[in-house]
């Protein structure tokens, strides 16, 4: 707190001196209006390049952690609703108590419906690939250019063309050696055909194709029980329409034995008469690839697309960086470059984005759900498990993003933090403001002194809010992930 007091004291002193000279706002009418807010990510508050870069980075980080916490809350509530938690227990902000209630409901349902559910692993067979997180290098370059422009430099950086130093793993093109895996991102044709590995979803069109994914346009599955669509076969109750052979070909009010066709978009494990979208386990897509089409290569000469480095880059990196990205000066003669780099790197790290993880959850249903008489209960539980999978993927993704933002990045997968998180970096830089203010390093116009003082006072409040978002999200996510043994 001593450094904060120093900053405030120096800025107040400067402000009083300016007011005693008279006409502070008359001389700077354009900057004496409403102050910008750090929490809103406003780009101009003090007029000083380094201070505004730091304010912007704190604002970006606050908005990101708040957004991740909001997404986590939505996922917790969706899980709770699917697994029968009372609405009253799902109201308001997500809390540790709410997470515990939802977790208990999910575990109770799984343990009663899955063989071996009473065991520690709930009888689930889980295959999991963690998400990949990286900061957009273009964000760092744009922030550096903006900061240097504010400091009076020419700032001629062009995002997308500038390569930066990446302290961590580079997930883009690399100038120099790549200590990791090289991948070639090929151009996807107009038809979406991918002759290599499809990273995303694959779409096939019917009619009459075997589908294990989302079917749009009619899914037919073998059934001996209740059908919530068109029953094709024998109906033990009343059938709304029969074909010329006397078989049911409409809605059945009783048990349907034959096939059941559902026209709405739904999970399908049978024959799809429309479009089937699924995630290829081996990357092999026989239809249209909706995502990245990549192939592994051994040399750049083998690549007809963009060669990407998935690992440490000994030179400069473009694309994404898992860890801190240090942008170059946009103007080599700019004295403010070094002061701009820290906040520009933090801004890029604060906007870290992660790809969804790969998660497959296998299980065997308990004997109590077998047989035609239990068709409805079986279908309801399978639907719940689809919700469980989707929401757990989202929670795992958010957990990876929040950990990267706050505690730092594990760039080599050994479970230890290799690059510190942007929150740690920003707190260090903020702690150094006092000495810099006392040595007259900042150039804040008189009219913006009050705004700057307000912004400095706003930062400790934001840090408290970020810490609260972090605690609820990380602890709650870890608790829920424990259901699948993570």
Image (tube, rainbow, N blue to C red):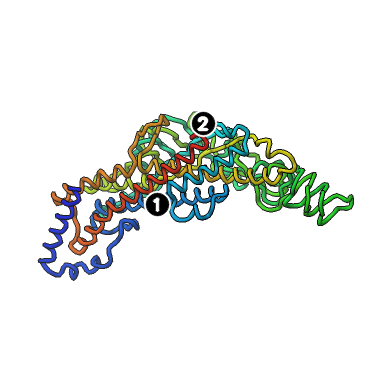
User: 306 or 442: nearer the eye?
Assistant: 442
Q: Mark 1 or mark 2, which is nearer to you?
A: 1
Q: Residues within 10 Å of mark 1 (few under 14, many from 20)?
A: some
Q: Residue at x 51, y 36 (%)?
A: 184
Residue 81 in the image: x percent, y percent? 55, 51
Q: Relative to 169, is 76 on the left or the right?
A: right
Q: Relative to 104, is 164 on the left or the right?
A: left
Q: Residues within 10 Å of mark 2 (few under 14, many from 20)?
A: some
Residue 482 in the image: x percent, y percent? 48, 37
Q: Secondary structure at mark 1?
A: helix
Q: Residue at x 62, y 36 (%)?
A: 114
User: 76 or 197: nearer the eye?
Assistant: 76
Residue 387 in the image: x percent, y percent? 57, 46
User: 142 or 422: nearer the eye?
Assistant: 422
Q: Relative to 394, is 467 on the left or the right?
A: left
Q: Can residue 141 be seen at all in this image of the molecule?
A: no
Q: How many marks?
A: 2
Whichever of labels 1 and 2 marks the residue nearer the N terminus, that label is 1
Residue 412 is drawn in which quadrant? top left
Q: CA distance from mark 1 to mark 2?
A: 40 Å
User: 34 or 359: nearer the eye?
Assistant: 359
Q: Relative to 338, is 313 on the left or the right?
A: right
Q: Are marks 1 and 2 in contact (CB under 8 Å)?
A: no
Residue 315 is drawn in which quadrant? top left
Q: Which residue is mark 2?
A: 297
Label for residue 66? 1
Residue 160 in the image: x percent, y percent? 40, 47
Q: Specify the farthest residue to the right.
A: 245
Q: Secondary structure at mark 2?
A: loop
Label for residue 75? none
Q: Can residue 111 be seen at all in this image of the molecule?
A: yes
């Amino acid at each position: 707190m001593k450094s904060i007091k120093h900053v405030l004291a120096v800025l107040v002193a400067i402000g009083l001196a300016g007011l005693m000279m008279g006409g502070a706002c008359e001389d700077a009418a354009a900057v004496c209006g409403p102050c910008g807010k750090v929490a809103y990510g406003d780009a101009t508050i003090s007029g000083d390049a380094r201070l505004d870069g730091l304010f912007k980075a704190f604002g970006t980080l606050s908005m990101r952690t708040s957004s991740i916490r909001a997404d986590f809350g939505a996922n917790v509530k969706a899980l709770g609703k699917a697994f029968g938690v009372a609405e009253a227990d799902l109201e308001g902000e997500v809390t540790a108590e709410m997470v515990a209630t939802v977790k208990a409901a999910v575990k109770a349902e799984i343990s009663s419906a899955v063989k071996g559910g009473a065991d520690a692993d709930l009888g689930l067979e889980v295959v999991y690939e963690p998400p990949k997180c990286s900061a957009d290098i273009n964000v760092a370059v744009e922030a550096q250019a903006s900061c240097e422009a504010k400091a009076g430099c020419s700032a001629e950086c062009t995002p997308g063309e500038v390569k930066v130093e990446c302290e961590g793993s580079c997930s883009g093109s690399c100038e120099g050696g790549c200590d990791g895996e090289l991948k070639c991102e090929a151009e996807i044709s107009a038809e979406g055909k991918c002759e290599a590995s499809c990273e995303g979803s694959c779409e096939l069109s019917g009619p009459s194709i075997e589908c294990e994914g989302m079917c749009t346009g009619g899914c037919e599955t073998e059934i001996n029980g209740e059908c919530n669509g068109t029953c094709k076969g024998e109906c033990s109750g009343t059938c709304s329409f029969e074909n010329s052979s006397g078989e049911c070909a409409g809605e059945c009010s009783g048990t349907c034995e034959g096939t059941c066709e559902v026209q709405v978009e739904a999970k399908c494990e049978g024959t799809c008469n429309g479009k089937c979208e699924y995630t290829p386990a081996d990357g092999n897509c026989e239809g249209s690839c909706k995502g990245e089409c990549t192939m592994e290569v051994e040399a750049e000469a083998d690549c007809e697309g963009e060669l990407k480095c998935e690992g440490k880059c000994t030179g400069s990196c473009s694309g994404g960086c898992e860890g801190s990205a240090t942008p170059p000066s946009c103007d080599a003669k700019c004295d403010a470059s070094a002061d701009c780099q820290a906040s520009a790197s933090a801004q890029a790290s604060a906007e870290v984005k992660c790809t969804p993880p790969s998660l497959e959850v296998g299980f065997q249903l308990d004997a109590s759900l077998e047989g035609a008489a239990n068709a409805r209960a079986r279908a309801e539980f399978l639907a719940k498990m689809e919700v469980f999978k989707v929401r757990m993927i989202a929670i795992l993704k958010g957990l990876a993003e929040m950990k990267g933002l706050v505690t730092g990045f594990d760039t080599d997968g050994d479970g230890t933090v290799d690059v510190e998180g942007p929150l740690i970096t920003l707190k260090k830089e903020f702690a150094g403001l006092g000495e810099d203010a006392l040595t007259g390093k900042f150039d804040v116009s008189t009219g913006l002194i009050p705004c700057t003082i307000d912004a400095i006072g706003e930062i400790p409040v934001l840090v408290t809010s970020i810490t609260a978002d972090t605690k609820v999200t990380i602890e709650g996510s870890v608790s829920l992930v424990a259901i699948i043994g993570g």
